Amino acid sequence: QVQLVESGGGLVQAGDSLRLSCTASGRAFNNYHMGWFRQAPGKEREFVAAIRLSGITYYADSVKGRFTISRDNTKNTAYLQMNSLKPEDTAVYYCAAAPWSGALRTDSAYPYWGQGTQVTVSS
């Protein structure tokens, strides 16, 4: 089991950058693949990015080339670096942890979720 806490959200203008952090409790962080999802008001939660324990990464087409997912196992932290932000990136961003090696683009792969952090991008 792992507990996740996101931070780093905020209000920015289009073209700005933000870095989200997801800190895990305990010593279990290096046992999980990590993912980022987002949910805008009135819309379903959607996949953003994921990183396996091996370092292999996955990105949604909408963020590819702009966002970078990474992890620092010494700090029990996963990151989402978001550059060239657009208004359509506005959402609550959730960190998630998966103990399996399945389809990390689907939220069903993740039994553990953080509480979310708001990202708002103005035009």
Image (cartoon, grey):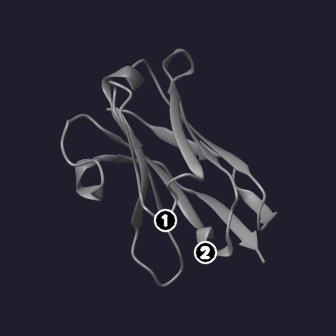
User: Of the numbered discs in the image, which one, if any, rests on residue 88?
Assistant: 2
Please state which of the two labelled residues, at mark 2 or mark 1, is closer to the viewer. 1
Residue 34 relative to residue 122: left or right: left
Q: CA distance from mark 2 to mark 1?
A: 10 Å
Amino acid type of disc 2?
Glu
Residue at the outermost front position: 65
* Residue 23 picture quarter: top right
Across and down, in percent, residue 54 comes to: 33, 24
Foreground of the two, 91 or 66: 66
Give above or below for 81 relative to 10: above
Q: Residue at x 40, y 68 (%)?
A: 45
Residue at the outermost bottom position: 42
Residue 104 relative to residue 55: left or right: left
CB atoms at circles 2 and 1 under 8 Å apart? Answer: yes
Residue 94 visible from this viewpoint: yes
Q: Specify which label sits upstream in the sequence, 2 or 1.
A: 1
Amino acid type of disc 1?
Ser
Give above or below for 42 relative to 25: below
User: Of the numbered discs in the image, which one, if any, rests on residue 11?
Assistant: none
Q: Say few, some or many: other residues with alpha carbon within 10 Å of mark 1 (under 14 / 14 to 19 / 20 or more).
A: few
Q: Say few, some or many: other residues with alpha carbon within 10 Å of mark 2 (under 14 / 14 to 19 / 20 or more).
A: few
Residue 35 visible from this viewpoint: no
Across and down, in percent, residue 2 comes to: 38, 33
- Identify residue for label 1: 62
Give the quarter of the figure containing the N terminus: top left
Residue 37 relative to residue 87: left or right: left
Foreground of the two, 81 or 95: 81
Across and down, in percent, residue 78 comes to: 52, 34
Q: Residue at x 73, y 69 (%)?
A: 121
Foreground of the two, 96 or 65: 65
